[in-house]
Amino acid sequence: MTPKKQIAVLGSTGSIGVQTLDIISEYPDRFRACLLVAGNNVDLLIKQAIKYRPDLAIIANENLYSRLHDALKDYGIATASGAKAIAEAMSLPQIDTVVTATVGYSGLEPTLHAIEAGKQIALANKETLVVAGELVTEKLKSSSSKVIPVDSEHSAIYQCLVGENRESIRRLLITASGGPFRTKTIEELQNVTVSDALSHPNWSMGAKITVDSATMLNKAFEIIEAHWLFGISPDKIEAVVHPQSIVHSMVEFVDGSVKAQLGLPDMHLPIRYALGEAHRLPTSQRGLQLSDYSRLEFFAPDTEKFPMINLAYYALERGGNVACIINAANEIAVAAFLKQRIRFVDIPSIIESSLSSMPYIASPSYEDYVNTNSATRLYAESLIH
Ligand SMILES: NC(=O)C1=CN([C@@H]2O[C@H](COP(=O)(O)OP(=O)(O)OC[C@H]3O[C@@H](n4cnc5c(N)ncnc54)[C@H](OP(=O)(O)O)[C@@H]3O)[C@@H](O)[C@H]2O)C=CC1
Ligand SMILES: CC(=O)[C@@H](O)[C@H](O)COP(=O)(O)O
Ligand SMILES: [Mn+2]
């Protein structure tokens, strides 16, 4: 019998984390959760640990450690807390694949450690490549790690590229739903609420990425992510608005042919594909009925209304710590918007102001990224009254 693949789930209590555990449950002979990591939701982490019996459960918030320890001590499940413990756990010998499903900058450090330890990476945390794509790509060159994307667009592109040569690619076409404000005017955007921004038309996701979809910064991040994942220059990567989110992305080749990957807007599919290491695992889950969709539409993005898409090209052209600044400012701005401390339209202003104030570093080291992230967060916070 083939041994079960041992999976570390970083962010097990979040949207991608919970769906990853669904896939582990769907294939109990194939996968086992050997490590679960959460941020603050200790109650759900305890429930998951009792159900999935990992070797180790880690809570990032150190203040919640005693709750976790007390609840799991009689189950023979080891416990730990804090960012250092998460980073160190990446080299546990039993781990085969790390699913990076924490949100934001927190994904970078454990992913770098997992790459150093030669683990397979199912990459959901796009911010890792946004913040430090160059460093991550460099580290991958001297590691046996392989990254398989979980992000739906990148999974689609990955699937389209199987059997193709990089030289045959003319363009990557990244589809974008357009978010909840696709049809709003610039004036109407002034007064949108948190609840409006969290009403994504097609996907059920964590709050931060849902707001990023509403500003369409998510698409800028995905252009950056695609550049580092597939080694394609920015001028060959475009966003295409596709309100139905059925075509998850496309690749156009030099002979004019376009390949697309289609499916329901359901992250179980790309997670299943990534855990199967690009093999197709049979499922009884409902598939796509194309006859349910009388129209699949495609439009050019409105960059006047959603100027943040263009930040991808600016960040990739300037390089260095620019995308790290954008990401840190955005994390602070989105958190403030979710707490109703700023308006939706203040998010781009906070990013722009951070970009013009934070020092540029052309060839950042890991420590430079750490410092850029902390300093930008402090600066962005200072802009919020
Ligand atoms: N949701 C989706 O459909 C998609 C998500 N992604 C990407 O996947 C990642 C996860 O997104 P999503 O699942 O929506 O996010 P959620 O907010 O739903 O979940 C985030 C997870 O990360 C944990 N977490 C937060 N901060 C830390 C930290 N400092 N250390 C350890 N764990 C932490 C949270 O723990 P807790 O809740 O316990 O505090 C939670 O388990 C993001 O990078 C997103 O861009 C990409 C494509 C689609
Ligand atoms: C599910 C997924 O991959 C998200 O990144 C999704 O693409 C967000 O939707 P938008 O296309 O609205 O950004
Ligand atoms: Mn996506």
Image: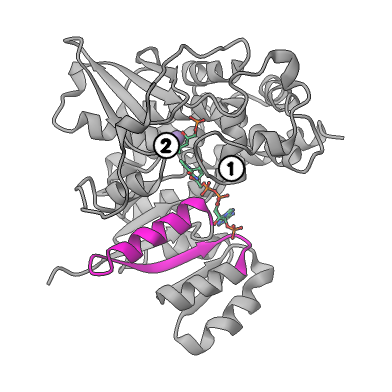
Quadrant hosting residue 135: top left
The image shows residue 302 at horizontal and vertical percentages of 55, 12
Disc 1 and disc 2 in contact, CB within 8 angstroms: no
Answer yes or no: is residue 347 visible.
yes
Residue at image point 56% right, 28% down: 179
Front-lying residue, 125 or 84: 125
Q: Is residue 134 above or below residue 355?
A: below
Give the Cα separation between the discs numbered 1 and 2: 13 Å
Badge 2, how many Cα within 10 Å: few under 14, some, many 20+? Answer: some
Quadrant hosting residue 170: top left
- Which of the marked residues, 1 or 2, is nearer the chain's N terminus? 2
Judge from the rendering whether residue 261 lies leftward or rightward of residue 330; answer left or right.
Answer: left
Answer yes or no: is residue 378 visible.
no
Is 383 within the magenta? no
Q: Is residue 143 above or below residue 346?
A: below
The image shows residue 298 at horizontal and vertical percentages of 41, 16
Badge 1, how many Cα within 10 Å: few under 14, some, many 20+? Answer: some
Judge from the rendering whether residue 179 lies leftward or rightward of residue 350; answer left or right.
Answer: left
Badge number at residue 135: 2
> What secondary structure is marked by label 2?
helix
Front-lying residue, 69 or 250: 250
In the image, the segment drawn in magenta is 14-42
Disc 1 target residue: 370
The image shows residue 162 at horizontal and vertical percentages of 18, 33
Going by the numbered disc 1, the residue's amino acid type is Val
Judge from the rendering whether residue 304 lies leftward or rightward of residue 168; answer left or right.
Answer: right
Going by the numbered disc 2, the residue's amino acid type is Leu
